């Protein structure tokens, strides 16, 4: 119908892509806030107040990771819209920049990533949602872009126009700034650095399926995670933390995730399709599907992936051991 035939008070209906547009205008933020200490009490004291303050995150999770160098990282994972994060951080930053953080005998780190809609994808093996997906209104699917190498990249909208390749190579030093006599280091992650949070949830598995997962698949997964962690230059993976998800009181859960940073999406793709460790994970999984049948399986797998934009990410390390996250490339 021509527009001039519309009633005077006619309003165009919100287009189907309205929510997509809103997401682009106000992208998602994932914040990882860690403490290197046997106990998380000092970070807890901050988090309990900060995360419930105005403009706080819409979702918070907890996890623990054993550092290769000994000791542990306790971490909070929190999600925001960018506009809220910025208002929140305007107040929350006071605690992080306080000189007392330098002398508490523990390390603190925060890794804040912007996840613009066009640089992001998340995939779930069932309709149950995890990570940022847990806060989504719903999900689409089943989808076509999966089950072949490169599927992850194809699901990132920008890949249609952009190769998403890193500008430098693995040896390029990352831009960084030392503050407070080097006790505080800020690192700028390079454009297109790929962040993956790849999760496993075996809490619904029972009996033989649970035993199969824990005895046959989980150990193979750990092998793959150790490979990425210990071979950064060969795999082009800057950092890999294998994290046990914790409940709200730091108690155990039956969930874990790998949090990985590689120079770009191609590096993870390469590892997934051609390295013996992910091939073993992949085959172990297919065998599990054969054994129990896809319709009976209770194992949940999911991931969220971002090819980082040039702006909007903050990586800060205070008193951390030198191998932490991106600190070792500063
Ligand atoms: C029990 C754990 C895991 C299982 C069973 C598993 C299995 C799979 C499967 C079946 C695919 C193909 C997905 C598709 O249909 O597109 C896949 C892809 C992939 N996986 Fe894993 N995976 C696991 C853990 C991980 C972890 C922890 C990481 C990284 C930290 C990872 C990285 C990847 C990547 C990057 C791809 C995408 C490859 C591409 O699209 O080219 N996986 N995995």
Image: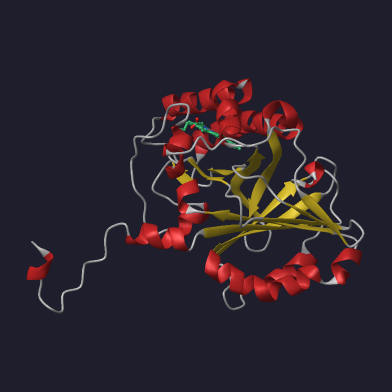
Q: Closest to the observer: 245 or 105? A: 105
Q: Which residue is pictured at 40% across the width and 63% down the height?
A: 22
Residue 9 point in image, percent of width and height: 15, 79
Q: Is residue 58 visible?
A: no
Q: Which residue is pictured at 45% across the width and 49% down the height?
A: 118
Image vertical order of residue 326 relative to residue 168, above or below: below
Q: How many marks?
A: 0
Please say which color scheme the image uses. Answer: secondary structure
Image vertical order of residue 273 relative to residue 228, above or below: above
Residue 210 point in image, percent of width and height: 54, 37
Residue 317 point in image, percent of width and height: 79, 55
Which quadrant would residue 78 be assigned to in this image?
bottom right
Which quadrant would residue 154 be assigned to in this image?
top left
**Horizontal side, residue 160 vs residue 277: left or right:** left
Q: Is residue 270 visible?
A: yes
Q: Closest to the observer: 281 or 293? A: 281
**Horizontal side, residue 298 vs residue 267: left or right:** left
Q: Which residue is pictured at 45% across the width and 62% down the height?
A: 25
Q: Residue furthest front?
A: 4
**Horizontal side, residue 243 vs residue 116: left or right:** right
Q: Closest to the observer: 14 or 225? A: 14
User: Dividing the image into 4 quarters, which one contains the C terminus?
Assistant: top right
Q: Which residue is pictured at 71% across the width and 25% down the height?
A: 234
Residue 128 point in image, percent of width and height: 42, 50
């Amino acid at each position: 119908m021509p527009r001039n035939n519309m009633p005077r008070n006619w309003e165009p209906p919100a287009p189907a892509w309205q929510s997509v547009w809103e997401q682009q205008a106000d992208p998602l933020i994932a914040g990882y806030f860690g403490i290197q200490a046997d106990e998380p009490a000092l970070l807890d004291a901050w988090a309990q107040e900060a995360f419930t303050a105005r403009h706080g995150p819409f979702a918070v999770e907890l996890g623990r990771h054993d550092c290769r160098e000994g000791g542990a990282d306790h971490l909070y994972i929190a999600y925001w819209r960018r506009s809220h994060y910025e208002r929140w951080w305007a107040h929350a930053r006071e605690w992080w920049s306080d000189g007392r953080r330098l002398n508490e005998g523990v390390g603190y780190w925060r890794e804040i990533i912007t996840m613009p809609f066009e640089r992001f994808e998340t995939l779930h093996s069932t309709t149950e949602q995890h990570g940022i997906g847990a806060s989504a209104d719903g999900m689409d699917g089943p989808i076509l872009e999966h089950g072949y190498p490169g599927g992850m990249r194809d699901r990132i909208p920008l890949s249609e126009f952009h190769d998403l390749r890193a500008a430098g190579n693995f040896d390029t030093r990352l831009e960084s700034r030392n503050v407070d006599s080097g006790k505080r280091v800020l690192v700028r992650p390079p454009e297109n650095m790929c962040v993956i949070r790849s999760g496993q949830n075996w809490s619904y598995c029972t009996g033989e399926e649970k035993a199969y997962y824990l005895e046959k698949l989980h150990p193979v997964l750990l092998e793959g995670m150790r490979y990425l962690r210990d071979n950064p230059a060969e795999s082009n993976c800057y950092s890999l933390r294998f994290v046990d998800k914790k409940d709200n009181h730091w108690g155990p859960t039956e969930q874990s995730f790998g949090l990985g940073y590689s120079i770009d999406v191609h590096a993870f793709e390469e590892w997934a399709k051609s390295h013996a460790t992910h091939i073993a994970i992949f085959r172990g999984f297919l065998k599990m599907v054969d054994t129990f049948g896809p319709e009976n399986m209770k194992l949940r797998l999911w991931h969220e992936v971002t090819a980082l934009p040039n702006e909007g990410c903050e990586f800060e390390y205070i008193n951390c051991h030198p191998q932490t996250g991106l600190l070792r490339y500063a």
